[in-house]
Image (spheres, rainbow, N blue to C red):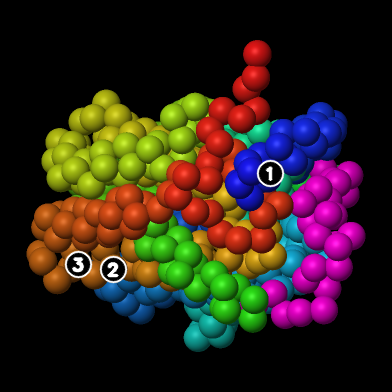
Amino acid sequence: MTELTNAAIEVDDAPPADPAHVKRAAVAGLVGTMLENYDFVIYGTASALVFSKLFFPSYSPTAGMIAAFGAYAIGFLARPLGGLFFSHYGEKFGRKWVLVTTLFLMGGATFAIGCLPTYETAGMWAPLLLVLCRFLQGFGAGAEQSGGATLLTETAPLGKRGRLSSFIMVGAALGTALGAIAWIAAQQLPDEAIMSWGWRAIFWSSIFVTIFAMIMRAKLAESPVFVELKKKGHGQDQAPLKVVAKHGTKNVLKVIFMNWGVSTQSYTYQVFMISYLVTVVGVDTHFVPPVQLAAAICAAFAAFAMGYLSDYVGRRKMTLILTGLLVVTPFLTFPGLNTGSPAMITFVLVFGYMFAAQGVTGVHMSFFPEIFGSRYRYAGVTLGREFSSIIGGGIAPLLCAALLGWFANSWIPVAIYMSLTMLVSFIVTYSLPETADRDLNLPEDAKWGEARLGAGRKA
């Protein structure tokens, strides 16, 4: 009997996961990522709408937008550093330890942004402090989604990993929705009030999301795969990053490029296009948050739907369908935005949020952990996702703004950039094997023919 068959028998005969633990892990993953995305969305929206005036007022409008997005990008540059730091301890001390610690860091940094002085009162210290807080936000977020995805994938029963792990991105979409609601509420104030204290109140509100997330994670159980590794003494006497460097470098690089186009398009839709609509199309700033809210709510359903479908058709096939679609759509997106039609703009942003922002990543939340072996799964997923955040989401709004300036407000170079990065993600995904329902206790990375799609759906 082959090793694969033995592995399949071992997993199929394993006792089912405790439903209470599975449910708690799903909710905890959802609310943690909700906080992360809430923090990032309110910052991204502030970068597009107010930060260029509050922290970079000596620049022209376009230069101020680039400077604000530059500060935004700092958070993504910090994410791999946070990923390196926290993934080390996530492999040694458990997924739960990291998920609780990062909440404090992200929530505290976001609250601190609301306390910062502006350029008018503190001069150059204001943007420097903004960059520092943004760095701490990114450092804490560096292992948040990866940790939640790893814990949920390792906790979920066979046949349901895709749909349950997608709750991470459902939480991300709900965080976007909460951020949009916060800005909708703030924009009911006079412009003077928004610029003086309204934007601060939005950042202070993150404390409530942080407290709620902490309550949920305090009751969280550790991943059963990690518990089994700890019983066997694996990973306790070695540096996890050295192990992943020795055995998993190839797949870390593949995850980086699988996620490159997805991350690029995600943050182009969520951040850059807000600024594009305001500065180029001439849309009123009050129009944007309600559209973001509608798009985020639709995206929450899309994340779950794509994760659910991946349990049936496979992670690889589902990802190829979505990334293939997104190679083409940027050339339709901008003509739709440029019509200035509220209905068309809403349709374009809803599509982008559903498929680019949350749809593909809803599948990735189970796909990425299944790619790696048990010895360094957390480190592998974290390093792959967070290094891709530098070349993807971190620089996407900044580079799109620069391309717009270099080519006299032409959208074509931006669409080419979005399409080419997604083409890379499609090609790299095609090179990977199917992973659905593979044995997560295996120490080796996924291999062709190893997946057992549908193993958890027995009559």
Quadrant, the C terminus = top right
Q: Nearer the viewer, residue 70 or 252?
A: 252
Circle 2: residue type: Leu
- Residue 91 lies in quadrant: bottom right
For the residue labelled by badge 3, is the local secondary structure a helix, a strand or a loop? Answer: helix
Position in image of residue 426 (x %, y %): 30, 51
For the residue labelled by badge 2, is the local secondary structure a helix, a strand or a loop? Answer: helix
For image coordinates 64% across by 76% down, the residue present is 243
Residue occupied by mark 1: 6
Residue occupied by mark 2: 399
- Residue 10 lies in quadrant: top right
State which region is magenta.
Answer: 216-241
Report if residue 229 lies within the magenta region. Answer: yes
Residue occupied by mark 3: 403
Q: Is residue 95 visible?
A: yes
Vertical order, 252 against 192 (above or below):
below
Position in image of residue 28 (x %, y %): 75, 43
Vertical order, 141 against 359 (above or below):
below
Check residue 149 in the rendering and tell me which mark sits there, or answer none: none
